[in-house]
Image: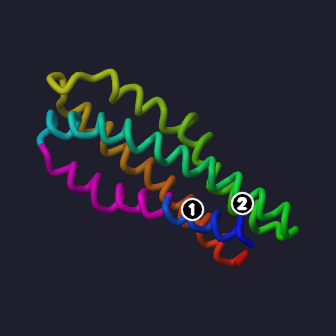
Amino acid sequence: MTFGILALTVAALFTGAAVYVSFVEHPARSVLDDRAQLAEWKPSYASGAVMQASLAAIGFVLGGLAWHATGELRWLVGGLILLAGWPYTLLVILPTNKALQAMSPSDAGPASRALLDRWGRLHAVRTALGVASTAVFVWAS
């Protein structure tokens, strides 16, 4: 059960960070002018991506270990849901990320704002994956 508690803790950390970005950081960023908005997103995303990717991988491994230790399939399902953020990011969000990263803040304008609005909507799916994973881990507990 220790692996399960750790998996739940990691999923909750992932979810808390994702919820914060979706409901606090990104909306606050959206009221900035185009240049400041893009300039703020770049280092924020770079730092957050490493943390969130690590939490997703660790949560998946812990969920898998909890499944192996207990035979309870919900641990594996919760881990897979959390890990689903990786392919989603690579296949769906990465083109938007690359376009934003290629822009200089001095070139920011309606195009960068539209991309950041899109990024916020796409990130909401990662938030939902975190919520779902955490809920499944709670259910498995």
The relative height of residue 46 versus residue 107 in the rendered view (above or below) is below
Compared across the picture, whether 19 is left or right of 39 comes to right
Residue depicted at 35% across the width and 61% down the height: 20
Q: Main secondary structure of the magenta part?
A: helix
Q: Which mark is residue 11?
A: 1
Residue extending farthest to the left is 33
The relative height of residue 118 versus residue 6 in the rendered view (above or below) is above
Residue extending farthest to the front is 2
Type of the residue with mark 1: Ala
Q: Give how far across and how far down residue 47 sits, in percent.
A: 38, 40
**Badge 2: few (under 14), some or many (20 or more) residues near its Cα, within 10 Å?**
many
Q: Which residues are magenta?
A: 14-32
Residue 76: name its quadrant.
bottom right
In the rendered image, residue 78 lying in the magenta stretch gets the answer no
Q: Quadrant of the C terminus?
A: bottom right
In the rendered image, residue 18 lying in the magenta stretch gets the answer yes
Whether the residues at callouts 2 and 1 have beta carbons within 8 Å, the answer is yes
Mark 2: secondary structure = helix
Type of the residue with mark 2: Gly
Per the model, the C-alpha gap separating discs 2 and 1 is 9 Å
Residue at image mark 2: 63
